[in-house]
């Protein structure tokens, strides 16, 4: 999860005295005036911190709330550093899966303690995996519960009252606290790094054809048409197989049945698929329809999802030069490489590469990678290596977590990654002057 400096006045309180523009131009911090407004004083005096930690077995998303700003967190341990009563920063460390992340976590906590900072820690999912190597050190630092933490446990710590307070539970912990109003600790432990990049239309892939009339993941003809007009030139379609072996565009059969109100057995035949419209108005796409649309839009490029047979699909697509296939096994990647199909390696097979990942990608001429944006924080070293080699990483899971939409990814993550799977085209100002 990307590190960001926040203020409780964002979207809520006055910034530069003009309430109407806060949502358009959120403050990076709060500038104290000689005579603070009533609303600002109230914000400082009534600021609340809510820590909600859920273990793996709770099957819930852990999060924290500072004032009115809620952040959902990933696996591992998250440190929330309170710079003032209305300003904070945070970072999540995958202490379950990364030894480096665990070491960095302990290093930051050591600095926080030394500087007498006000902070909180909460766990999500599983957090103890690689942290166990630091158990003794954590106990000596005053964290006996964290030092003996087991995987799949909920954990919360804070020092808002001056002393370390720890809490442990097998499922969930929900803690609400008043933030002291006299906090003044301007030091930043998680400085935000900006990566320079050139605006380009090929940084944005229309996810499942892009949103149409506010509806996501339709993979429909109307989605392609609307999003082409808006500016997209790269389009992802989910490809699934009908009962009789035909390839069609649908996210999955359960979603298709909800979209079409189909009540029969799944998957359906190709003929049955063609009978139904999504929400009674959006046209479904079979392979013939996909080829027809891309033939009529010669500057559009197809990125596939779900299908893992590169040769069979590419041989039937209208233009192999405008095809990039996300593939889900190393065998499929190698098959594509042998016949010159552009392969995008997915997150799971990328993780299964033994040895030098970059050497493998180079040997198989892989120039595209698909990763969840949720892994960015713990994969920065790999992402920097991929960036250096000119391999384009596109992140998915945009709009999956509250506040982590296209604009967030654009402002906080692009540059480190090359592009994103976007539901909406919100990039007119960004790619202004770039030919569509």
Image (tube, grey):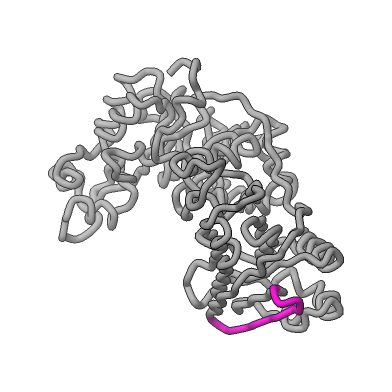
Q: In this view, does 27 lie to the left or right of 265?
A: right
Frontmost residue, 286 versus 256: 256
Q: In which quarter of the image is the C terminus?
A: top left
Q: In this view, does 164 lie to the left or right of 140?
A: left
Frontmost residue, 392 versus 182: 182
- Residue 325, given in percent of the width and then of the height, sits at 47, 37
Residue 194 shows in this picture: yes
- Residue 10, given in percent of the width and then of the height, sits at 53, 50
Frontmost residue, 210 versus 318: 210
Residue 370 shows in this picture: no
In the rendered image, residue 165 lying in the magenta stretch gets the answer yes
Q: Which residue is drawn at 62% across and 58% down?
A: 86
Q: Which residue is drawn at 67% across and 67% down?
A: 96
**Highlighted range, magenta:** 160-171
- Residue 318, given in percent of the width and then of the height, sits at 35, 24
Q: Residue at x 23, y 56 (%)?
A: 258
Residue 94, picture quadrant: bottom right
Frontmost residue, 387 versus 304: 387
Q: How many labels does the image show?
A: 0
In the rendered image, residue 364 lying in the magenta stretch gets the answer no
Q: Residue at x 69, y 81 (%)?
A: 166
Residue 28, picture quadrant: top right
């Amino acid at each position: 999860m990307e590190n960001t400096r926040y203020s409780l006045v964002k979207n809520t309180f006055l910034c530069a005295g003009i309430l109407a523009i806060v949502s358009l131009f959120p403050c990076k911090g709060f500038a104290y005036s000689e005579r603070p407004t009533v609303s600002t004083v109230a914000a400082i005096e009534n600021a609340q911190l809510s820590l909600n930690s859920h273990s793996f077995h709770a099957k819930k998303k852990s999060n924290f709330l500072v004032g009115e700003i809620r952040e959902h967190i990933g696996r591992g341990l998250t440190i929330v550093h309170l710079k003032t009563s209305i300003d904070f920063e945070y970072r999540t460390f995958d202490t379950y899966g990364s030894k480096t992340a665990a070491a960095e976590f302990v290093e930051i906590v050591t600095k926080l303690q030394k500087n007498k900072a006000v902070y909180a820690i909460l766990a999500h999912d599983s957090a103890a995996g690689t942290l166990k190597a630091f158990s003794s050190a954590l106990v000596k630092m005053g964290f006996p519960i964290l030092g003996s933490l087991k995987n799949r446990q909920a954990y919360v710590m804070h020092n808002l009252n001056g002393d370390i307070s720890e809490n442990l539970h097998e499922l969930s912990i929900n803690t609400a606290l008043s933030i002291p109003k006299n906090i003044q600790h301007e030091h930043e432990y998680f400085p935000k790094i900006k990566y320079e990049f050139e605006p380009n239309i090929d940084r944005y892939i229309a996810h499942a054809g892009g949103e149409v009339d506010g509806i996501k993941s339709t993979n429909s003809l109307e989605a392609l048409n609307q999003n082409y007009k808006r500016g997209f030139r790269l389009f992802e379609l989910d490809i699934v197989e009908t009962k009789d072996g035909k390839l069609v565009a649908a996210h999955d059969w359960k979603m298709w049945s909800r979209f079409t109100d189909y009540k029969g057995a799944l998957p359906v035949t190709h003929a049955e698929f063609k009978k139904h419209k999504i929400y009674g108005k959006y046209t479904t796409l079979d392979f013939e329809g996909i080829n027809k649309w891309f033939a009529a839009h010669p500057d559009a490029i197809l990125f596939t999802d779900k299908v893992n047979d590169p040769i069979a699909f590419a041989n039937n697509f209208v233009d192999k030069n405008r095809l990039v296939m996300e593939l889900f096994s190393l065998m499929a990647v190698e098959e594509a490489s042998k016949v010159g199909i552009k392969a995008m390696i997915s997150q799971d097979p990328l993780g299964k590469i033994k040895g030098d990942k970059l050497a493998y990608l180079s040997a198989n001429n892989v120039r595209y990678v698909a990763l969840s944006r949720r892994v960015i924080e713990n994969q920065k070293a790999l992402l920097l290596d991929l960036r250096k080699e000119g391999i384009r990483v596109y992140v998915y899971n945009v709009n999956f977590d509250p506040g982590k939409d296209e604009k967030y990814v654009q402002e906080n993550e692009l540059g480190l990654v090359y592009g994103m799977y976007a539901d909406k085209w919100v990039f007119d100002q960004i790619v202004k002057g770039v030919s569509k």
